Image (tube, helix red, strand yellow):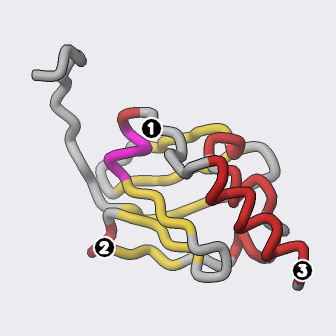
Amino acid sequence: MNGMPSALVSLARIVNVMVSDDSLSVDLEDGRTVTVPIGWYPRLAYATPAERAYFEISGAGYGIHWPDLDEDIGVEGLLIGKKSTENPASFARWLQQRNKN
């Protein structure tokens, strides 16, 4: 063990995704809804409403993919409260490229 507490996470498939200026909410097939701050995912936070609305439920229902943002978020990460782990330099390059277009 790495010293971190462990917990059993019961995964369920995504059935609905809602993205606002403030939060990302995911409804799961077992009735749970997980809501996290949009700021946890900088690419979503900087996206336009249209870009946020264009997503695909991926990974057999266990993930969400935003093609225009090159962003992927999984159910497991949402359930354990995992924020984006994107390197700040990588995000800065993405933002700079985005501002060129």
Classified by dominant secondary structure, the portion drawn in magenta counts as helix
Q: Secondary structure at mark 2?
A: helix
Q: Label 3 crowding class (10 Å Cα cut-off): few <14, some 14-19, many 20+?
A: few
Residue type indicated by callout 3: Lys
Element assignment for label 3: helix
Kind of residue at badge 2: Gly
Q: Which residue is mark 3?
A: 100
Question: For this rendering, which residue is in front, 78 or 25?
Answer: 78
Judge the density around disc 1: few (<14), some (14-19), many (≥20) Cα neighbours within 10 Å. some
Is 76 in the magenta?
A: yes
Whether residue 63 is in magenta: the answer is no
Instruction: Spot the residue most to the bottom.
Output: 101
Give above or below for 11 relative to 16. above
Question: Which residue is found at the position 72% from the left and 65% from the top?
Answer: 93
Q: CA distance from mark 1 to mark 3?
A: 30 Å
Quarter holding the C terminus? bottom right
Q: Position of residue 4 (x, y in %)?
A: 24, 18
Question: In the rendered image, which quarter is residue 77 located in?
Answer: top left
Mark closest to the chain's N terminus, 1 or 3:
1
Question: N-terminal of the two: label 2 or label 3?
Answer: 2
Asked which secondary structure carries label 1, the reply is: loop
Q: Nearer the viewer, mark 1 or mark 3?
A: 3
For label 1, the residue is 82
Quadrant in which the N terminus appears: top left
Which percent across, then down, holds residue 42?
70, 51
Quickly name the residue at label 2: 59
Q: Nearer the viewer, residue 2 or 78?
A: 2
Residues tagged 1 and 3 counted as in contact (Cβ below 8 A) = no
Q: Measured from the top left, where is residue 20 in percent x and y?
A: 76, 54
Q: Residues within 10 Å of mark 2 (few under 14, many from 20)?
A: few
Q: Which residues are magenta?
A: 75-79
Q: CA distance from mark 2 to mark 3?
A: 31 Å
